[in-house]
Amino acid sequence: MVDKYVIGGYYRVSPGRGQDENLNVPGAYFVTAAFDHSCDVVSPDDVRPSNLFHLYGLIARIALVATAIEIEQAGKAIEGGAAAGSSRASKAPE
C-alpha cells in the first residue's frame, strides 16, 4: 500500500510447507498476484479474480488500521513507563 492505495499484490510461496505451516522460512519466495482484467471497476455480482484485488485491498487496509492502533498503544505504554520511571528517579532517597 502507498497512502491509501493498493498498488500490487504478492503471494509468499514456500515449497514443501502445508497450508497451516509458517511460510516465513529460508527458501520462501514471492510471486506476483496477476489479474486478467482491469481492477478499476467492481460489481457485487462480478466473480472474476479482479474482485479479489479489491478484497485484498480491504484486508490490507484493515491490517494497516490494526497496526496503527497497536503502535499507538505501544507508544502510550512506553510513555507511561518512562513517566513512572522518571517520577521514581526524582524522589529523594529516604
Image: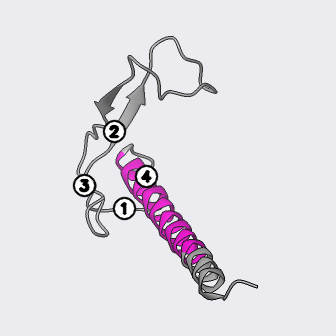
Residue 91 is left or right of residue 48, and the answer is right
| Residue mark closest to the camera, 2 vs 4 | 2
Q: Amino acid at mark 2?
A: Tyr
Q: Secondary structure at mark 1?
A: loop
Q: Earlier in the sequence, mark 2 or mark 4?
A: 2
Disc ID at residue 59: none
Q: Earlier in the sequence, mark 3 or mark 1?
A: 3
For marks 2 and 4, give the CA distance: 10 Å
Disc ID at residue 10: 2
| Residue mark closest to the camera, 3 vs 1 | 3
Residue 34 is left or right of residue 55, and the answer is left
Q: Amino acid at mark 3?
A: Ile
Q: Quadrant of the C terminus?
A: bottom right
Q: Residues within 10 Å of mark 2 (few under 14, many from 20)?
A: few
**What range is drawn magenta here?**
50-78
Name which residue lies at 60% across and 80% down.
Answer: 89
Q: Amino acid at mark 4?
A: Tyr
